[in-house]
Amino acid sequence: MNDHLQDLLANNRQWAETTKQREPGFFTRLAQQQSPRYMWIGCADSRVPANEITGLDPGEVFVHRNVANVVVHSDLNALSTIQFAVEHIKVKHIIVVGHYGCAGVRAAMRGIRVGLADNWLRHVQDVRLRHRRRLDHLPPDQQEDILCEMNVIEQVGNVALSTVLQDAWARGQAVSVHGWVYGLSDGLLKDLKVSMDRPESVVNVFGEAIKRYPRGPAAVSADFADDENDDISLGSPGAGSP
Ligand SMILES: [Zn+2]
C-alpha cells in the first residue's frame, strides 16, 4: 500500500480517537441506529461534501450522489435510496444540491462528449432543451450557472413526482423536498426557493421557480413554440423540441 493510503488510515485513527474523546459513546450510539432528519442528493464532485459544508456529523445526513445530481424516474439506485430514506429512516427533508462550475452541467450545456456519461448527461441536456428560450440569450458563463440552477429545480420536481414521495404524501407523512446550489468559489449554499411539501404544491412551485428566469427575444424558427408556459410543466422536453 502506498504512503498516501497509509496517511488516510492514520488520519482515520486520529479522527476516531478525537471524536471518542470529544463525545464518549458517539460510535456506540451510531452503531445501534441512524436517524438523520435530512437526505442530501448531490453531485459526486469531490469539492461538494454534504457533511462538511453543512456542519453535520456522521449520522445526521443520508447521502446519495451521482454525476450532476440527477434524479431519473427509471434509476433504481436513486429511487431505492430515496425510498429507504423516506419509508424506513423517515427523513423530514430531501435536499437536491447542485453546484456552480459543475463539469457535468458544463458538458451538457456545451455539447461536450465525455464518454459513457454522455448518456447520463442527456438528462441535463433535456433540461437545457426545455428551457432554451430562458438560456440561449445569456452570456456563456451565465448559461452554465443558470443551467446548474434549472437542473436542480427539475430534479426537485422529479423527486416530488416519484412514487415514493407521492405515496408518502398520500399517507400524510411530513416530508418536504428542497433545492439548493453550492458555490465552489465562496463555499456558500443558496436556497433556490423551490420547496415542495404536498402534491398540490408541485406544479405551482415548479412553474413559479422557472418563471424567475426571463426569456430572451422570440426565436425566428417556427419550430420553437412561443407559449410563455410551454417549458414550465413537469415532464419530458417541450412540444417545440427540434
Ligand atoms: Zn458537479
Image: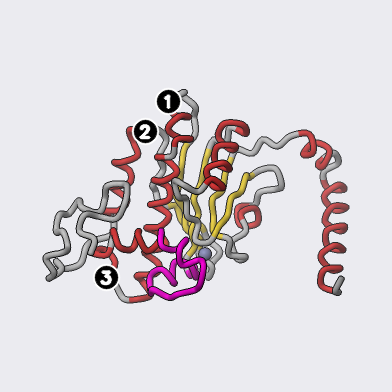
Q: Earlier in the sequence, mark 2 or mark 3?
A: 3
Q: Which range of residues does the magenta coloring cover?
A: 101-123
Badge 3 amino acid: Asp
Per the rendering, the mark at residue 170 is: 1
Q: Residue at x 49, y 70 (%)?
A: 103
Badge 1 amino acid: Ala
Residue at the spot of label 3: 136
| Residue labelled 2 has its Cβ within 8 Å of some atom of ligand 1 | no
Q: Element type at marker 2?
A: helix
- Label 1 and label 2: CA atoms lie apart by 8 Å
Q: Earlier in the sequence, mark 1 or mark 3?
A: 3
149 is higher (above) or lower (below) than 103 = above
6 is higher (above) or lower (below) than 17 = below
Per the rendering, the mark at residue 231 is: none
Residue at the spot of label 2: 199
Residue placed most toward the observer, 25 or 111: 111
Q: Residue furthest top?
A: 171
Residue 212, percent from left and from top: 28, 55
Marks 1 and 2: CB-CB under 8 Å?
yes
Residue 54, percent from left and from top: 60, 52
Residue 2, percent from left and from top: 85, 74
Which quarter shows the N terminus?
A: bottom right
